[in-house]
Amino acid sequence: MATNEELIEEYQRKREKIKEMGGAEAIQKRHQGGQWTARERIDYFFDPGTFTEIGLFVKGRTTAFGMDKREIPAEGIITGFGKVNGRYIAAAAEDFMAMAGTFGEYHGKKLASIIDFAKGKGWPFVGMNDSGGARLQEGMDTLEAYGWTFHSQIMASGIIPQIALLMGPCLGGQAYHPVMQDFLIQCRDTGFMGIAGPAFVETQLGEKISLQELAGYKAHAVKSGCTHIVADDDKDALDKCKTLLAFLPPNNREKPPRIETRDDPERAVPELDTILPERLTQPYDMKKLIKAIVDDGYFFETLELHARSVITGFARFNGRPVGIWANQPMWASGAIDIDAADKGARFIRFCDLFNIPLVTLGDCPGYMIGSEQDWKGILRHGAKLLFAWADATVPLISIMVRKSYAGAHYGMLDKTIGADFVFAWPTAHVTIVGADTAASVIFAREIRESANPEETRARRISEFSELYENPYRAAERGYVDDIIMPSDTRKMINRALDALEDKNKDNKAFNARPWRKYSNINL
């Protein structure tokens, strides 16, 4: 019978063997490829000495196809919890050095378990994805493990923030895991994600395509909209994740963390009084406006490379985290197309789930028109924004900067769809359509039959514009709370946020909403 000392020595040997990560040579090879090991990622991410690992000794039970002879340390995934910048976070890091981080039965059990643990504790979850895909040797047991993972993360959705870091390959059914989380950060040169890899695509469809083109950052940060943030490497991805977490509450029952700031909430921004071009059709960079009004000029953008006619991201006002949804006149005049509508609606719903106030900065000529958009469902996708706004319960503040026409007037948030406060600049054009469009419809016959059609058209456009293309009609009806100087925008937002600090706390109208599971949003 072994002595206590021998048992302890055996324990230490087993533990160290599991944590060896394939040895020094394998680690060096990984570093040469520009990547850290899973344990190095965990060590960098968590505050020193705070990480507690769960499930180090977990081992799969499959013996078929030589699996009984395979060593897969910690089942290819490190799970546990600790503190990040002093706040509790739960995490999982796939270990590509352990049978390529393949997803098997007990790999999936560990992943689902740590997500369930995070949900129960009310702590955010961060997943570091780096896996060769499904462990086919385990057959049905691998397939079922995906179901545990998907179910756990869906049950945690809307309760705790979930962030995925795409740091290596993530192909096949496993790719749904990061996409289903709230935010996805992809490493530029090493992160790959797809429903199938290039070899499978070529075999099944005959399409020849590289891994980078099919599953790299351009495929998802630019085209598909699956990737919210692009990182340079492992360190940058982990740093960006920490920055994002600092804007978010730990769960849906708490408010996002407010920090101290020296930026005066009443600060005037005089440059905004002259930021807009004189010509209505001339573009300008909305990001300059955003950075001018937020605390210390800091704006954390999400989905920057996708649907670029609109902007989403996080900033702070007087130390409070706030979500920002804005048009970008530099791209397609700031029009809302299908991708832009999806981008905005999901962002709005995330902020609402996690008690983050929303501010809009509107300068939008309308939803994108034309046969391509109509046939692909702009009406269905555009309606997502309307559902998102009407369902939202967080403080909602709209700033109408310039154009606010037609359906986009609601897509960018107005009073009747749910805004608590609406402020318009004197430069705002708040009306059903622009004067050019109105004249071509209302006065088409008069213009066509007049002695001087161009003169009649110009006169009618001028009349319509003078009457309706301004913020005063909306203010007269109470749809705009005030018309403000652009330089006072920061001040007015901060005052509105102060007034809305405890929105819904004693709101009988809100509490009296009819019961329902959820709205039937146009998915």
Image (cartoon, grey):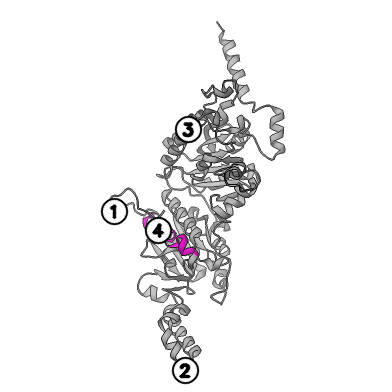
Between marks 3 and 1, how big is the CA–CA gap?
39 Å
- In the orientation shown, which residue stands out farthest toward the top? 1
Image spot of residue 116 (x, y percent)? 44, 35
Task: Let me know if residue 266 is in the magenta part.
Answer: no
Which amino acid type is marked by label 4?
Answer: Trp
- Residue that appears at 46% across and 76% down: 434
- Residue of label 1: 513
Which amino acid type is marked by label 3?
Answer: Ala
- Residue that appears at 29% across and 53% down: 513
Q: Earlier in the sequence, mark 3 or mark 1?
A: 3
Q: Secondary structure at mark 2?
A: loop
Mark 1 Cα shell of 10 Å, populated few (<14), some (14-19), many (≥20): few
Image spot of residue 340 (x, y percent)? 50, 59
Instruction: Specify the quadrant of the image occupied by residue 204.
Output: top right
Which amino acid type is marked by label 2?
Answer: Ala
Please tell me whether the stretch drawn in magenta is mainly helix, strand or loop. helix
Q: Which residues are magenta?
A: 372-393
Q: Earlier in the sequence, mark 4 or mark 3?
A: 3
Q: Which numbered marker is on residue 306?
A: none
Q: Secondary structure at mark 1?
A: loop
- Residue of label 4: 389
**Circles 1 and 4: CB atoms closer than 8 Å:** no
- Residue of label 3: 145
